[in-house]
Image (cartoon, rainbow, N blue to C red):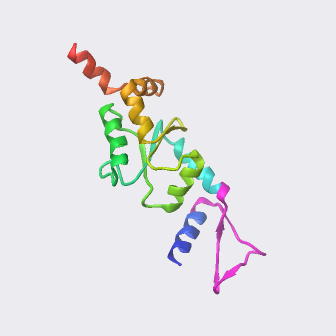
Amino acid sequence: MNSIMIMAARCLRSGAYRTAQNNVELLSGRARLMCSSSAAQKTLEEMVKKDKVVVFIKGTPAQPMCGFSNAVVQILRMHGVDRYAAYNVLDDQDIREGIKTLSNWPTIPQVFFNGEFVGGCDILLQMHQSGDLVEELQKLGIKSALLDQEKESK
């Protein structure tokens, strides 16, 4: 029942709610709100566009709760990317499942640049190793800290 109340509160806050059958649908004697999936997808689309860099991870950047999420945080940190939106998918099952649907990618973490899905940990690591991440960050107007380190070593 608690999850129904949480979902109902989310729907009400977002304004994305509807009731069924003439505004009343009873389930076990209680009114049930039904949130439209298109509204949830729209909310996720807004979330991925919120910042230049957006990550969906298990835990927080300060305390990642899995090795793959930690690797994403560490890669961004190495490049000096300290301003990005991070969403803890462990706090919200709807976000966890919804982002997988939006990106058509089955695993967490997920990384987005300018609202575009980049990939997960493996893709970000590959981009870091090949140098492509430096170029992609430059396209976002972010200068990689690795460029400064490279100049200092010369």
Give the quarter of the figure containing the C terminus.
Answer: top left
User: Magenta region: which residues?
Assistant: 13-38
Residue, far bottom: 29
Is 5 on the left-hand or right-hand side of 17?
left
Q: Does the magenta-highlighted stretch encompass residue 27?
A: yes
Residue 121: x percent and y percent? 41, 41
Is 139 or 58 nearer to us in this picture? 58
Left or right: where 101 falls relative to 54: right
Residue 71, x across and y down, in percent: 34, 42
On the image, which quarter does residue 151 sit in? Answer: top left
Q: Is residue 95 above or below residue 2?
A: above
Rendered location of residue 126, percent (x, y): 41, 32
Q: As displayed, is residue 148 above or below residue 18?
A: above
Q: Residue at x 33, y 51 (%)?
A: 64
99 left or right, relative to 120: right
Residue 88 lies in quadrant = bottom left
Residue ID at (50%, 62%): 93
Which residue does the image show at 36% across and 34% down from the upper left? 81
Residue furthest out toward the right = 22
Q: Is residue 10 magenta?
A: no
Q: Residue 20 location, x and y as percent?
A: 74, 72
Up-down relation of residue 41 to residue 94 (above or below): above
